[in-house]
Image (cartoon, rainbow, N blue to C red):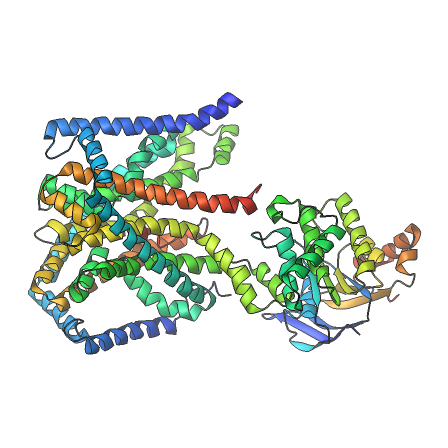
Amino acid sequence: MRAFTGSRIKPYYLLGVVGMMLAWEFSAVSLPGIVPRLAAVGSSLLLLAQTGELWRQLGVSLQRSLTGLSFGAALGLLLGTAAGLWKPAYYFFKPLMGTLLSSPAVVVVMLAMVWFGVGSFMPVFVTALFTVPVMYVSVVEGMELVDAEVLEMAAVFRISRWALWWNIYLPALATAVLTGLAFAAGTAFRKTIMAELLGSNDGIGYAMAMTRFNLDVARLFAWVAICLCVGVVVQRLFVKPVASYLRKWRDVNSESGVVHE
Amino acid sequence: MSNFWNARKVLPFLWMATGVVAFTVVWQLMSNSYGPLLVATPSETMVAVTRLLTSPATLAAFARTLGRVLLALGLQIVSGVASGVLAGLYPWVEDLLRPVIDALVAVPPVALTLLVILMFGSGDYQVAATALALGFPLLYTGTVRAVRSVDRSMLEMFRAFRLPRTTQLLVGYLPATLYALIPSILLATGLTLRLVVMAEVMVGGGSGIGQSLSEARVHMATAEIFAWLLVMAATVLMIEGTLLYLVKSHLLKWQARR
Amino acid sequence: MVIEFDNVSKFFGKRKILDSVSFRLEEGQILAILGPSGIGKTTLLRLAAGTVKPDSGQVRTDKQRFGFIFQEPRLLPWRTALANITLVLQNLGLSRDEQKEIASTMLKRLGLQGFEQYYPAELSGGMRQRVSIARAFVIDPQLALLDEPFTGLDIGLKISLRQMLLDLLTWHPCAMMYVTHEPQDAVLLADRAIVLEGKPGKIVASMDFECPRGERDQAYIQEQAAILTSVLTAKESPVKC
């Protein structure tokens, strides 16, 4: 019955959280000057919120993520649908998508810096570029689930092309887009932060890079905590529900979003 | 019939080749219109690739990076499998570790890398530790899933024949888990390489591919950057291919005629 | 005495599966257990093997070696036929060579000579079940537990495997609990048959086959099987034979 630990209250989870906090506090006390105390991080966080810096940078980063996500997802959907419907297109795009999926984002960030300089466009470009394969893969896999047997059944019963689209392809596509968006949301935010950190003049990533020059570890921790919140919100709000919905009828790993740095 | 099979085997490669050619042409056109300084031509990039693969300095950088990747990957597997088996067997361990995993999954990798650099400085172990921390959740969750998927009827067999618990773990759980883990390990390989390169770039002044890349960016040597991109993609593909081949040549023995 | 069930009841959650089951199995005796599916026949075997414990009552046995043959072969896919058999020999304090020796003799006895190094996936369904039988008998069991081992195999295979099992019993005489839903099977193999019925499952009939196993002819088998069938179909009238 171990599989059914889904919904009950988990005391050990809370224990884990408390343990993490304690371990942190302990290392802060034993490594003074290296690991900041929880209280210091808390006050940094408070300061960021009070000065409005938090909301400003968060807004910038979120806006860039969303812009990149929309463009990337749209392109991924387009290419994915083509590849899902027409096998040659799938093979045509395979080398490109393979290269994109296996290339480190830093390298692309560097190229983008050479091309576009530091500014708002660079992070958006990088985000969009890396959202494309996530959406693409999701759509192609989703369309693959429309299996030959269903299509054969449709042919035998002479179901019209329109009905075929409405009843078979569109639902499959809708689910795939939902999955793709959920997984891409996490990717998009990470890429934006990375691009900002390496070459931008605002946004959360930039703010993090600044803490490096000021050697302000507490403030860096505060920013990391904010990123964590965004990440957890994305995971809980989008990825987990979608994955658990999908798991009812196919094998999905809710950590699929983790495979890109 | 044989014609049919040939067409099915050859056509995908033809289309893939068409894809490669088409993108090379687009690349060449872009390079023509933006100038080779911004977009190095494909031929320049190929020259750079051969330069990378023949110069001792870059080969050393490459080896350095691969060493770190292997170190991090090894540690990921050991720690991920060990904790994953425990969490798979005892749900309370999973609950206990959940916050740590949640945090590692949610944190942007650059942010964690920056934290490590700021707190512990930069070096071989710091790079490997970062990659370890960030790749760990993948193998851990993979192991938990694998352990959970171990066939209950198989366990009943072990109990019915009164075999000791160590046998059950070594002969039953371990192979079942390892075989189910192969996809996760393949994913982790590519991820770790990317993480290590990212950490190297951020550390700055270090060594490895990341350092070469940073230098290339400073000199605006796009050919070099493109070349590294290709080399890394090829490396990931090669490592994955070799692993997959090894696995399959062994697995095929008992997965034959399924 | 090999094993004794004394007023054994078993629950799965709140549902009662078995209700005060009692019987005794003597040395060398073969007991057939019949009844509709889902009645708790497999649970009875699990109780005997000790993999589940009774909720009330007692299962008494002083035996150590139990050979279990499951409905499906349950071989480890990553071990060869031979290695699947040596696996269960490691409790007996034998050397590695002795283990291999014994295991391959067993495989030979079941007509699997030359297939020692095959993986389960490379064997046919009947061959796999033979490996599973070999695995159960290789430990020279004091009690063999068989859970409908031949369901899902075709009729020819069923007959030849049944014969193989009978031959095996002359080499390795042991007590046996044999779950089946075919009366023919029961009469062919067993000394005694019990029938489980109802919700929760209870023993509603018990029947001894007095004619020794070797001397049962077609007429006897058919006659006894007919009686068993009538017990199985007429649920309301427990027949005591």
Left or right of residue B254: residue A45: left
Q: Residue at x 28, y 48 (%)?
A: A184
- Viewer-closest of B237 and A18: B237
**Image coordinates for residue B250, horizontal then vertical, percent:** 50, 46
| Quarter occupied by the C terminus of chain C | bottom right
- Viewer-closest of C171 and B144: C171
Is residue C199 among what the camera can see?
A: no
In the depicted structure, whether residue A94 falls above or below residue C13: above
Q: Residue at x 14, y 38 (%)?
A: B222
**Image coordinates for residue C220, horizontal then vertical, percent:** 92, 54
Left or right of residue B135: residue C208: right
- Viewer-closest of A74 and B94: B94
| Quarter occupied by the N terminus of chain C | bottom right
**Image coordinates for residue C2, horizontal then vertical, percent:** 77, 72
Q: Could you say which quadrant of the image residue A46 lies in?
A: bottom left
Q: Could you say which quadrant of the image residue B95 lies in?
A: bottom left
In the depicted structure, whether residue A3 falls above or below residue B196: below
Direction front: furthest residue? B56
In the depicted structure, whether residue A153 falls above or below residue C118: above
In the depicted structure, whether residue A23 falls above or below residue B142: below
Q: Residue at x 52, y 62 (%)?
A: B170
**Image coordinates for residue B48, horizontal then vertical, percent:** 19, 35
Left or right of residue A188: residue A151: right
